[in-house]
Image (tube, helix red, strand yellow):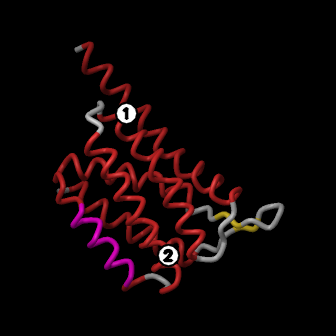
Amino acid sequence: MKYAVLYIASVVFINLAFSVVAPLTLPGGDSWSPVSLIVGFVFVIRDYAQREIGHKVLLAMLAGGVISGLMADPGVAFASICAFLIGEMLDWGVYSFTGRPFSQRILLSSAFSTPVDSAVFLAMLGLFSVPGVLMMTASKMLGAIIVYLLARKREQLARVA
């Protein structure tokens, strides 16, 4: 259950990080949090955890959300937990039902879930803007793309062997 534990810990870490790392103000007045750069990895860790424990990953999502709610800044934690759970449910659905190779499921599930997660999070904090959502989504997708490329390479090597 190493990925499940890592997933729960990463959810808590991300929510705490959003509570303590101040967002940057971009030209034009939009906000962007540098923490967004590592959120994409959490979505991917969830995919690995689901591979490890199946649909019980939903319980890991809930555990991460509850622990985060107890530890992080209440306003940020609530917005983050709501956005994260909505995004993670989308991620779980796409990952679970596409039937694609693992690397493609990582990329597809992140592509569906990260824009929704970003929009909900910013809206709940009263910071919603299209440039803000785009910037946050791009930051999150960076992690998913890196892991997709690594997983695809591993799949290609396994087919050759």
Q: Residue 11, located in which quarter of the rendered image?
A: bottom left
Q: Percent x, y for residue 42?
A: 40, 56
Q: Is residue 67 above or below residue 88?
A: below
Q: Percent x, y for residue 113?
A: 45, 52
Residue at the location (30% across, 35% down)? 102
Report the amino acid beneath label 2: Ala
Q: Is residue 60 magenta?
A: yes
Q: Residue 65, located in which quarter of the rendered image?
A: bottom left
Q: Is residue 15 above or below residue 48?
A: below
Q: Which residues are magenta?
A: 58-69
Q: Is residue 61 magenta?
A: yes
Report the amino acid beneath label 1: Gln
Q: Percent x, y for residue 115?
A: 53, 54
Q: Is 55 on the left or on the right of 82, as rendered?
A: left
In the picture of the structure, the residue carrying the numbered disc 1 is 104
Residue at the location (64% across, 74% down)? 22
Residue at the location (59% across, 73% down)? 21
**Quadrant of the frame with the N terminus:** bottom left
As helix, strand or loop, the secondary structure at mark 2 comes to: helix
In the picture of the structure, the residue carrying the numbered disc 2 is 79
The span from disc 2 to disc 1 (Cα, nearest Å) is: 29 Å
Q: Nearer the viewer, residue 132 or 160?
A: 132
Lower position in the chain sequence, tag 2 or tag 1: 2
Q: Is residue 117 above or below residue 76?
A: above
By secondary structure, the bulk of the magenta-drawn segment is best described as helix
